[in-house]
Image (spheres, rainbow, N blue to C red):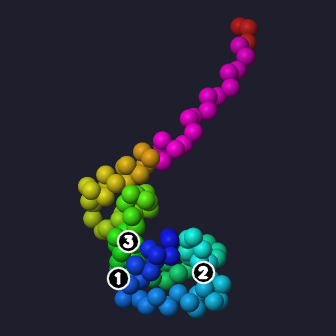
Amino acid sequence: MTWPSLKRAAEQLGIGPDAIDPAVADGLLVVGALVRFRHPLLRSAVYRSAGLAELREAHRVLAEVTDRAVDPDRRAWHLARATVRPDEAIAAELEASAERAAARAPPPRRPPSSPTRPS
């Protein structure tokens, strides 16, 4: 997540822009081109400590602040995590994300041909 996107999301959630400062000062978050947790276990602990309603709301807001033209795959993921019921529009965005991922993947490798054995 970019710093400007995170600031917009925090603002929409009523969280002040300075709320991140202690986590940065303690080395829990790294702020560069992207904001990220220093270690995946920290991210997991924070995520697991939130309630389901809090997580859905956070994902809803993160989807809103994620630019569809710049990062449609991340936006689709946040939308999916924010919903509790089947949603055709979100399913279509996830399908488009999967198609983009498949297009980026290298072609499948062919198995090596095995020499023929005489019968």
Q: Residue at x 58, y 91 (%)?
A: 22
Residue type at tag 2:
Leu
Q: Which residue is mark 1?
A: 12
Of the two numbered discs 1 and 3 on the same chain, state the one appearing first in sequence: 1
Q: Main secondary structure of the magenta part?
A: loop
Q: Are marks 1 and 3 in contact (CB under 8 Å)?
A: yes
Residue 68 in view, yes or no: yes
User: Which residue corresponds to the image point at 60% horizontal and 85% vertical from the top-left?
Assistant: 24
Q: Do labels 3 and 2 touch, CB within 8 Å? A: no
Q: Which residue is denoted by mark 2 in the rendering?
A: 29
**If you read the primary sequence from the N terminus, does the residue marked by circle 3 or circle 2 appear first?**
2
Which disc, if any, is residue 116? Answer: none
Are circles 1 and 2 on residues that touch, CB within 8 Å? no
Residue 23 image offset from top left, x and y in percent: 58, 87
Q: What number of labels is visible?
A: 3
Tag in front: 3 or 2? 3
User: In x, y percent, where is residue 8?
Assistant: 40, 79
**Label 1 crowd (10 A; few <14 / some 14-19 / many >=20):** some
Residue 30: x %, y % from top left:
62, 78
Real-space Cα separation, disc 1 to disc 3, in angstroms: 9 Å
Q: Secondary structure at mark 3?
A: helix
Q: Which quadrant holds the C terminus?
A: top right
Mark 3, residue position: 65
Which of the two residues, 61 or 112, is positioned nearer the viewer here?
61
As drawn, 15 above or below 87: below
Give the amino acid at mark 3.
Val
Residue 45 against residue 82 in the figure, above or below: below
In the image, what residue occupies the spot 48% across and 41% down?
103
Label 2 crowd (10 A; few <14 / some 14-19 / many >=20): some
Q: Nearer the viewer, residue 34 or 90?
A: 34
